[in-house]
Structure formats: C-alpha cells, structure tokens
Image (tube, rainbow, N blue to C red):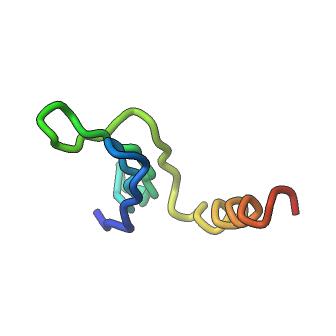
Amino acid sequence: MMDLGTIAKNSREEIRLTVETFKGMELVNIRVWYQDTAGEYRPGRNGIAFKLELLPEVQTALSKARKGGAA
C-alpha cells in the first residue's frame, strides 16, 4: 500500500488517499475514516476505489470542478 495523503474533513473525520493492490489490480482508494469512541481512526463505508489506470480521467474531471464546472 502506498499512502498518498490525508485531508482533514472535520474534527472527527479525515479523507485518506492510497494506492493498493486488490486481486492483482492496482486501485486508488479514497475513503473517509472516522474517529471511534476510543479516539482511534477506523475506515468508514464512504469512499471510492477505482483502477489506477483511470487516474488521468479522474484528474481531468476534477480539474473541471476547480475551474468552475463544465469545460
């Protein structure tokens, strides 16, 4: 697993970005982690995983959002 970074979502949640191998496929995993009652972070159900080869398309789509919508 390769850790790409962590982004604070709010005081009890963070978004973690990783590259992982699952069943022989490299996946980008973007998941919300939450803080449990003991203060430890646990992976939540909210998130998305997609093949690493799709990353350029995802980056293109996200860059449109940064530019203010449709291109």
Choose between 61 and 12: the one closer to the eye.
12
Which corner quadrant holds the N terminus?
bottom left
Q: Quadrant of the rendered structure where residue 57 is?
A: bottom right
Q: Is residue 57 above or below residue 33?
A: below
In the displayed orientation, state which residue is furthest to the left: 38
Taking the spot 31% from the left edge, 67% from the top edge, the residue there is 2
Which corner quadrant holds the C terminus?
bottom right
Q: Is residue 47 above or below residue 64?
A: above
Choose between 3 and 67: the one closer to the eye.
67
Choose between 70 and 25: the one closer to the eye.
70
Judge left or right: residue 69 versus residue 52.
right
Taking the spot 42% from the left edge, 56% from the top edge, the residue there is 25
Taking the spot 51% from the left edge, 62% from the top edge, the residue there is 52
Judge left or right: residue 69 versus residue 46.
right
Q: Position of residue 29 (x, y in %)?
A: 43, 53
Judge left or right: residue 50 versus residue 15.
right
Taking the spot 40% from the left edge, 46% from the top edge, the residue there is 10
Q: Is residue 37 above or below residue 27?
A: above
Q: Quadrant of the rendered structure where residue 66 is?
A: bottom right
Choose between 56 and 9: the one closer to the eye.
9
In the displayed orientation, state which residue is furthest to the right: 71
Counting the numbered discs, the total is 0
Q: Position of residue 3 (x, y in %)?
A: 32, 66
Q: Is residue 57 above or below residue 44?
A: below
